[in-house]
Amino acid sequence: MRVKAPLIFSTKFSTRLTTWLCTALLALPASAQTPAPTADDDLPVADVQTFAEVFERIKRAYVDEVDDSTLLHNAMRGMLSELDPHSTYLDPQEFQSLKESTEGEFGGIGIEIGMRDGQLMVIAPIDDTPAARAGLQSQDAILRIDDTATDGLSLQEAVELMRGEPGSEIRITILRSGESMPRDLTLTRQVIRTESVKHEFLAPGYGYLRISQFQSTTGEQVNDALAAMQEGNGLDGLVLDLRNNPGGVLQAAVEVVDAFVEQGLIVYTEGRLTDSQMSFSAHGQTAAPRVPVVVLINGGSASASEIVAGALQDQRRAVIMGTESFGKGSVQQIMPLGNGDGLKLTTALYYTPNGRSIQALGITPDVQVVRGRLEVTDSSAQRLREADLSGHLKGNGDRAGEDKTSPRVREDYQLGEALNLLKALKVLGPRAER
């Protein structure tokens, strides 16, 4: 029987590292934005000593040799990841990836992901991308990316695994709610160039405005789309589709709300830092101030899309329809570091005009309509009508013209219900406002 000798750790090394850490922390430059220190801000030397001891034990006893820089960077990543799912440490490459996503062009499969209870989840697929065409849905759990299990992966690590050269294949394993067996999907990466705004007419006089995510130019695109749809006879109603919209740029969300409301609060944020306490209000230069609006949301509507839905709901400017939204109501700031890396740090929470927090609660629709497809099984289309009888008397009026409803409406139950509601509001006219 072999008896292993106990490992001996250097108190001198641990003390030296503790002293270095304390000195480094105390030497951090004071910022004008940092809250005033309190008695609770005293450095916990005992915890720093424990950190130094753990650091030393890893250095001496871990199965593979690990350099100091890797350990310290891993410690910083862990420190941020334990705060919330959206705070993270960014190296220069990750900085660039974040910039590409915001500006609307990057290589990958076109999916927004997040963490829920430690599990990597789909927030929303982006329109017209490999993820959307493969049928990925909000709330799908991602179990594997190629041969890598997602258990224990950080959000940023998962993003990096999903991105790659256009034309290359990626295999992901998902588990969908209500299903007992995972499914494998193979997708081909492509350059993702997302146009965040699309518009068309669902029926004469009734417009459709789809925002897939909020980019820096989204507000301008929305105003252009509204102007185009209002040419001629104008708009009798509009469906604003924010389903599976994972969010994006805060200012873009404010500009979208500003296109529909003439005055009043849109959103405000509250945090510890002075610059994280912001408030945004309408400016009165409104593209569509009186057009009836129905907003469609679902479990993939997050962040900036929830700001828009919440503001229009509180302002009583639109009817919110669909299912409950995702509930991502926190604000992240990108903070550059002296070494070229950075932090994405949660610094505040969003609040709707009526003071409702979105975080972990989401937006509850005014009218609940679940996803589905309308299948017409009634045989009335084949039934005999008066006009089909031989020798029938002619009426004096003109028969209604052909159905000019977009095929999109017939394929999308929620969208069809939104259009029906807008038509009902048009029929009621001023009586609907009482």
Image (cartoon, rainbow, N blue to C red):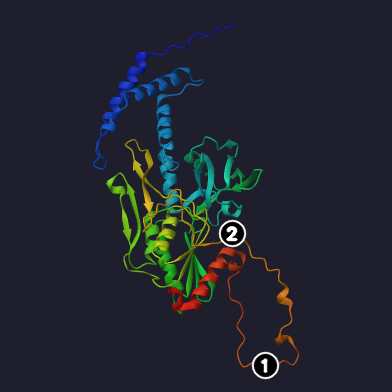
Query: Relative to residue 396, is residue 346 depicted above or below?
Result: above
Q: Nearer the viewer, residue 187 or 433?
A: 433
Q: Is residue 164 visible?
A: no
Disc 1: CA contacts within 10 A as few (<14), some (14-19) or many (>=20): few
Disc 2: CA contacts within 10 A as few (<14), some (14-19) or many (>=20): few
Q: Amino acid at mark 1?
A: Lys
Q: Residue at 37% of width from left, 40% of height from top?
A: 343
What x and y, as percent, mark residue 89?
A: 41, 38
Q: Is residue 96 visible?
A: yes
At mark 2, the secondary structure is loop
State the residue position of label 2.
371
First reached walking from the N terminus: tag 2 or tag 1:
2
Query: Relative to residue 195, is residue 89 depicted above or below?
Result: above
In the shown orientation, is residue 402 left or right of residue 87? right
Quadrant for the C terminus in the image: bottom left
Q: Residue furthest right?
A: 390
What x and y, as percent, mark residue 295?
A: 48, 63
What x and y, as percent, mark residue 21?
A: 32, 25
Quadrant for the N terminus in the image: top right
Cα separation, mark 2 vs mark 1, equals 43 Å
Query: Relative to residue 406, is residue 167 depicted above or below?
Result: above
